[in-house]
Image: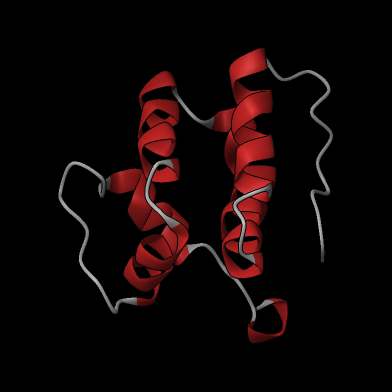
Amino acid sequence: MTGTTRSSSGLDDRRKRLLFRCWHRGTREMDLILGRFADAEIGNLSEAELDQLEILLEVNDPDLYAAITGDKVLPPAVTGALFARIKAFPITDGDL
């Protein structure tokens, strides 16, 4: 998979921007992790979860990837329920 499988049709502007940002991180691994999560969940996220996603998107790719793989701990202000959902989202080894 190399890009979004979800149309941004029907999404508000904020969700469209976040979907784009999740698929255009700069590293393929983070594009796939965040992009696939966003494809599946962006339409269902609450405003508070969108706020959390925006905070996560400010973390640089190496640090965020290390946190997702368990090699680094991020500050509590960055992590939370949404981060746990992203971390648990199913990604197969063939995707990365």
Look at the image and tell me in which quarter the C terminus lies: bottom right
Q: Total label count? A: 0
Determine the residue located farthest toward the top in the rendered image.
12
Note whether 67 is above or below 84 in the view shown.
below
Residue 40 in sight from this viewpoint: no
Determine the residue located farthest toward the left in the rendered image.
76
- The image position of residue 11, as x and y in percent, is 71, 20
**Left-right relation of 13 to 53:** right
Determine the residue located farthest toward the bottom in the rendered image.
93
* Rendering quarter of residue 51: top left
Note whether 96 is above or below 75 in the view shown.
below
Q: Toward the viewer: 6 or 60?
A: 60
Residue lying at 46% horizontally and 56% vertically, measured from the top left: 86
Residue lying at 25% horizontally and 72% vertically, measured from the top left: 72
Colouring style? secondary structure
* Rendering quarter of residue 58: top left
**Left-right relation of 15 to 87:** right
Note whether 41 is above or below 15 in the view shown.
below
- The image position of residue 50, as x and y in percent, is 45, 28
- The image position of residue 48, as x and y in percent, is 35, 24
Note whether 61 is above or below 42 in the view shown.
below
Q: Toward the viewer: 34 or 63?
A: 63
Residue 68 in sight from this viewpoint: yes
**Left-right relation of 59 to 80:** right
**Left-right relation of 23 to 90:** right
- The image position of residue 24, as x and y in percent, is 67, 48
Look at the image and tell me in which quarter the N terminus lies: bottom right
